[in-house]
Image (cartoon, grey):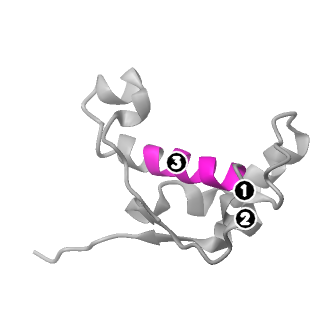
Amino acid sequence: MYVHPAGEGAASPLITGHGMTWMVGAPVEDTVAVMHLILAGIPVRYPRMRILASHLGGALPLLPRRLDDHLRSSPLRRPSCLRWPSAASGTTRSATCIRRR
């Protein structure tokens, strides 16, 4: 599954209202979309599925420990999330394209 932002600036006027739809909004949308998949337990239910997240996965590579810590103390922990995000994030990949000028 390839995850790419829709260019909606994560529906935030703080992003779109200041012309940051793609430079900031795209990685935010990537992060949110993949986190929805992880919290829904998709990587656990479909372990052979590859999730390719554009823009280096947004903030995901920086968040696994923070997500684990938050979910341990949060009432929002969902039963469908059978593994901690740090364990599930190992099943995600990030993709980017680098151009040389």
Whether the residues at callouts 2 and 3 have beta carbons within 8 Å, the answer is no
x, y (%) of residue 83? 82, 61
Taking the image as shown, residue 19 lies to the left or right of residue 37, namely left
Amino acid marked by disc 3: Ala
User: Quarter-wise, where is residue 61 in the image?
Assistant: bottom right
Which dot, 1 or 3, sits closer to the camera? 1
Which dot, 2 or 1, sits closer to the camera? 2
Residue positioned 34% across, 70% down in the render? 96
Q: Residues within 10 Å of mark 2 (few under 14, many from 20)?
A: few
The span from disc 2 to disc 1 (Cα, nearest Å) is 6 Å
In this figure, which residue is indicated by the disc labeled 1? 41
On residue 45, the disc is 2
Q: Which residues are magenta?
A: 29-39
Residue in front for this viewpoint, 69 or 33: 33
Residue in front for this viewpoint, 66 or 54: 54
Mark 2 lies on a secondary structure that is: helix
Up/down of 100 relative to 8, above or below:
below
x, y (%) of residue 85? 73, 58
Residue in front for this viewpoint, 28 or 83: 83
In this figure, which residue is indicated by the disc labeled 3? 33
Mark 1 lies on a secondary structure that is: loop
Whether the residues at callouts 2 and 1 have beta carbons within 8 Å, the answer is yes
34 is within the stretch colored magenta: yes
Up/down of 66 relative to 47, above or below:
above
The span from disc 2 to disc 3 (Cα, nearest Å) is 17 Å
Amino acid marked by disc 1: Gly
Answer with mark 1 or mark 3, whichever residue precedes in sequence.
3
